Image (tube, rainbow, N blue to C red):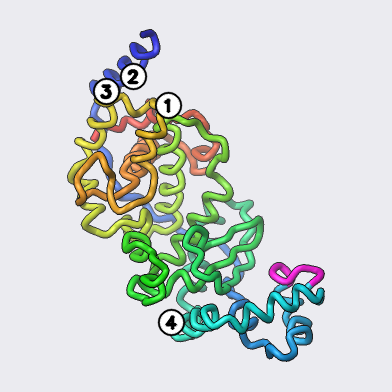
């Protein structure tokens, strides 16, 4: 009973709190003074498939200097050579490789986008190391199209062949996922991978509020790092799904509060607000999935607009309730 009273007290405060106007317009950072080398992407997939299957060992010798991360120290081991040979002669992987060459004869646009993004990252997080960036053929790894490890970023280029690519349909990838497997998602996905690797806490709280604020921070970082990227791309919605969230924001927030979900740790209920899918099952099929994460994004935006806080300070705040209470959020 005490717990429920505390929760309801919080809800009353939130509902009766002062209305502070919230705008999605943010000043763009002037990154003209940020000096970094232009990012050049190394195409591991392209170079690997150019290796002669009849002489894999010698081919790997030529690749090792640039691609030791992929090949490892024992790349000349017999089993490893056999494994790589099987990989480059696999008909399915060869088909994916050819499709990436046709779709991406060069990566100039992506290199420019990543260079600009890392200028913004260095502006806000000066100690960031600009990673070495590679592409490879992942076998359509939809769960991890971007791999980020320390100072390395690896892009599964075959995960961005367009929503109508036939092999996506053959693999049973649902349209809500395939719609995000387009060229314009590559740079945002790279920024999200960087932010998630560095700033999404592994052990965040189990309450819905903890989850949506943690994810909202990632989306806010994408806001300031990718100021010209539309919101629907950053969160991975169609424009219509984003509009649904905007039109229904007060109702979304009221539903979460009135059903005592904000501080709930009941995963059976809270996961419906944060897991991927075609829509949020509590609402109509016109709704997007991850509506709780979208709400968390708006809370973090409001917090940053109403507090004198730097992005580095934001990611260091672990108390989601503190962010909510100081956000002035009230749709």
* CA separation in Å, label 4 and label 1: 46 Å
Q: Which residue is mark 2?
A: 10
Q: Do the CB atoms of the residues marked 1 and 2 lie less than 8 Å apart?
A: yes
Secondary structure at badge 2 equals helix
Q: Which residue is mark 4?
A: 103
Task: Give the residue at x 41% y 49%.
Answer: 219
* CA separation in Å, label 1 and label 3: 15 Å
Q: Is residue 301 at least partly visible in the picture? A: no
Foreground tag (1 vs 3): 1
| Number of marks in picture | 4
Nearer to us in this view, 302 or 72:
72
Secondary structure at badge 3 equals loop
Labels 1 and 3: the sequence-earlier one: 3
Q: Which residue is mark 3?
A: 17
* CA separation in Å, label 3 and label 4: 51 Å
Residue 112, horizontal then vertical, whole percent: 49, 72
Residue 147, horizontal then vertical, whole percent: 57, 60
Q: Which range of residues does the magenta coloring cover? A: 68-74
Image quadrant assignment for residue 75: bottom right
Image vertical order of residue 328 relative to residue 128, above or below: above
Side (left or right) of 299 relative to 120: left
Nearer to us in this view, 255 or 250:
255
Q: Do the CB atoms of the residues marked 3 and 2 lie less than 8 Å apart?
A: no
């Amino acid at each position: 009973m005490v717990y429920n009273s505390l929760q309801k007290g919080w809800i009353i405060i939130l509902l009766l709190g002062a209305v502070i106007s919230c705008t999605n317009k943010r000043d763009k950072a002037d990154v003209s003074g940020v000096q970094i080398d232009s990012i050049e992407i190394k195409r591991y997939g392209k170079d690997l498939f150019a290796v002669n299957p009849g002489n894999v060992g010698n081919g790997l010798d030529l690749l090792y200097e640039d691609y030791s991360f992929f090949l490892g120290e024992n790349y000349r081991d017999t089993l490893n050579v056999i494994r790589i040979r099987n990989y480059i002669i696999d008909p399915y992987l060869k088909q994916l490789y050819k499709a990436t060459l046709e779709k991406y004869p060069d990566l100039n646009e992506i290199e420019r986008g990543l260079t600009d993004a890392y200028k913004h990252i260095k502006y806000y997080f000066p100690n960031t190391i600009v990673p070495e960036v590679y592409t490879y053929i992942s076998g359509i790894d939809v769960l991890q199209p971007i791999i980020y490890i320390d100072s390395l970023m690896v892009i599964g280029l075959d995960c961005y062949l367009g929503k109508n690519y036939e092999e996506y349909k053959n693999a049973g990838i649902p349209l809500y996922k395939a719609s995000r497997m387009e060229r314009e998602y590559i740079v945002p996905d790279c920024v999200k991978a960087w932010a998630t690797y560095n700033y999404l806490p592994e052990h965040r709280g189990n309450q819905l509020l903890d989850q949506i604020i943690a994810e909202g921070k990632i989306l806010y970082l994408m806001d300031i790092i990718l100021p010209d990227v539309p919101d629907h791309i950053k969160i991975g919605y169609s424009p219509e799904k984003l509009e649904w969230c905007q039109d229904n924001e007060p109702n979304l927030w009221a539903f979460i509060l009135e059903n005592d979900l904000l501080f709930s740790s009941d995963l059976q209920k809270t996961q419906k607000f944060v897991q991927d899918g075609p829509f949020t099952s509590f609402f109509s099929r016109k709704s997007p999935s991850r509506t709780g994460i979208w709400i968390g994004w708006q809370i973090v935006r409001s917090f940053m607009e109403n507090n004198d806080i730097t992005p580095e300070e934001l990611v260091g705040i672990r108390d989601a309730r503190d962010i909510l209470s100081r956000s002035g959020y009230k749709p």
